[in-house]
Image: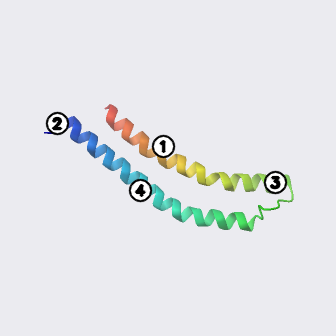
Amino acid sequence: MIDKRGAAALVVIFISIIYFMFGMILYQFIKTDIALARTELDCAAPDTPGDMFNCLLVGSIIPIVVITILSVAGGYATEKALK
C-alpha cells in the first residue's frame, strides 16, 4: 500500500520525466537550426576574432539548452519532493 507521500513522489517523478521528454523534443528542432547557423558562419575557418566568438557562441547553445532542460526537470522534482 502506497501512502500519500509515496504517491506524490511518483507523480512528481512522472511530471519531471514529461518535462524532460518535452525538452528533448524541442532540442531536436533547435539542433538542426544550430547546425545550419554554424555552416553559414563558416566555423571551419573563421577569419576574424568576431567570427571566432560567434562560432563559439553558436556552438555553446546546444549544451546550454541541454543543461537547462535537465535543471528544470530536476528542479521541479526536487522542489515538489521537499514540500
Per the model, the C-alpha gap separating discs 4 and 3 is 35 Å
Q: Residues within 10 Å of mark 4 (few under 14, many from 20)?
A: some
Q: Which mark is residue 71?
A: 1
- Residue at the far top in the pictured view: 82
Q: Find out whether the residues at labels 4 and 3 contact each other: C-beta distance under 8 Å.
A: no
Mark nearer the N terminus (1 vs 4): 4
Mark positioned earlier in the residue sequence (4 or 3): 4
- Secondary element at image label 1: helix
Q: Quadrant of residue 13?
A: top left
Q: Amino acid at mark 3?
A: Gly
Amino acid type for the residue under numbered disc 1: Ser
Task: Tell me the residue that label 4 is attached to.
Answer: 21
Quarter of the image holding residue 35?
bottom right
Q: Earlier in the sequence, mark 3 or mark 2?
A: 2
Q: CA distance from mark 3 to mark 2?
A: 58 Å
Question: Regarding mark 3 in the picture, which secondary structure is present there?
Answer: helix
Residue found at x 70% / y 52%: 57
Q: Amino acid at mark 4?
A: Met
Q: Residue at x 84, y 52 (%)?
A: 49
Q: Which residue is mark 2?
A: 3
Disc with the residue nearer the chain's start (2 vs 1) = 2
Circles 2 and 4 in contact, beta carbons < 8 Å: no
Q: Amino acid at mark 2?
A: Asp
Q: Depth-wise, is mark 1 or mark 3 nearer the camera?
A: 1
Nearest to viewer (mark 3 / mark 2)? 2
On the rendered structure, is 8 left or right of 82? left
Label drawn at residue 50? 3
Give residue 59's position: percent from left, percent from top. 67, 55
Label 1 to label 4, Cα distance in Å? 13 Å
- The color scheme shown is rainbow
| For marks 2 and 4 on the same chain, the one whose residue lies earlier in the sequence | 2
